[in-house]
Image: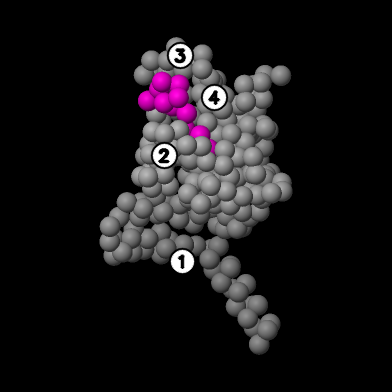
Amino acid sequence: MTDSIVSEHTGGVALLTVDAPGSRNALTLDLSTQLVAAVEAAERDESVHAVVVTGTPPAFCAGADLTALGNADEAGLRAIYEGFLAVARCTLPTIAAVGGAAVGAGLNLALAADVRLAGPRAKFVARFLELGLHPGGGMTWMTQRLAGPQQAAAMTLFGQPLGAEAAVRAGLALEVVEGDLIAAARELAAPAVAAPREALIATKRSLRTTASLAAHADAVDVEIQPQLASLASPEFAERLEAMRARIRSHS
C-alpha cells in the first residue's frame, strides 16, 4: 500500500491519519505535502469545525524520514516542516490523538496541535541529539512554552522520554485515554462542532493573540470586536431565543 495522509470528514471533524506503518509513520516530503493539503481542505470545508491528527497504530509518528533528512538542505528541511506547521497554523481547533511514539518531527507534529490526548502506549521523545542533530522545526520553543524550561531541557539536552502519564503531568498532554482514542478525540471536539464556525475560528485567533500579551486590559481590547460581531450574528440570536424558550418552559 502507498504511504499517504488518509483524510476523513465526518460529523464535523476532519480526521487526518499519517498512514505509513512500514516506517512507523515517518514524515517524507510527500507526506508533509499531503498533510498541508489535507489541513487546507479541512479549513475550506464549511462542515468541518475541528481537526484530529493521528497515526496508523502502533506509532504516532517516528519523525522525519531519515533518507529525506540526510539529503536535506535548508529548503528541504523547511519542506519537511511544512506538514506539522500546517497543523500549527490551522485556523480550526486541532487535537493530536497520540497512540504511540511521537519522535523528533513526530513530537513536533503532536506539539503543533492545540490539545494532545495520549493513549497508554504514547511516548513523547525528542531524540535529536541522540542522532547528532540540532532540534528543528521550533521544537525548543513549543516544548518550553508547553512544559516549561526545565522539562524542555530534560527532554532536549538529556534525552528524557515522557510516557503518557508523565506527559500529562508535564503539561504536554491533556489526559490519558484508556479506551478508543479517536472516539475520545471526537468527544472532546463535540462542543467545537456544535459551536458557530465563525465564532470558533475567531476565538482560536484571540487565544493566539492574547497568549503573548502582558496586560489584562490588552486582552479585553483584542476580544471586544469579535465578541460584538458574535452578538450581532443570527447564530447567537437563535441560541439566545432557544435558551429563553427553555427557561420559559421550566417556569
Numbered label attached to residue 231: 1
Residue 220 x, y percent position in the rendering:
33, 64
Q: State which tag comes first along the sequence, 2 or 3.
A: 3
Of tags 3 and 1, which is closer to the observer? 3
Hey, which quadrant is residue 41 in on the image? top right
**The stretch drawn in magenta includes residue 129:** yes
What secondary structure is found at the residue carrying circle 2? helix
| Left or right: 235 in relation to 145 | right
User: Distance of mark 4 from mark 3, alpha carbons?
Assistant: 13 Å
Task: Kindly identify the residue that appears in the image at 45 percent across and 33 percent down.
Answer: 159
What secondary structure is found at the residue carrying circle 1? helix
Please provide the residue range marked out in magenta: 124-134
Of tags 4 and 3, which is closer to the observer? 3
Of tags 2 and 4, which is closer to the observer? 2
| Left or right: 106 in relation to 249 | left
Residue identified by numbered label 2:
154
Hey, which quadrant is residue 60 in on the image? top right
User: Distance of mark 4 from mark 1, alpha carbons?
Assistant: 43 Å
User: Distance of mark 3 from mark 1, alpha carbons?
Assistant: 53 Å
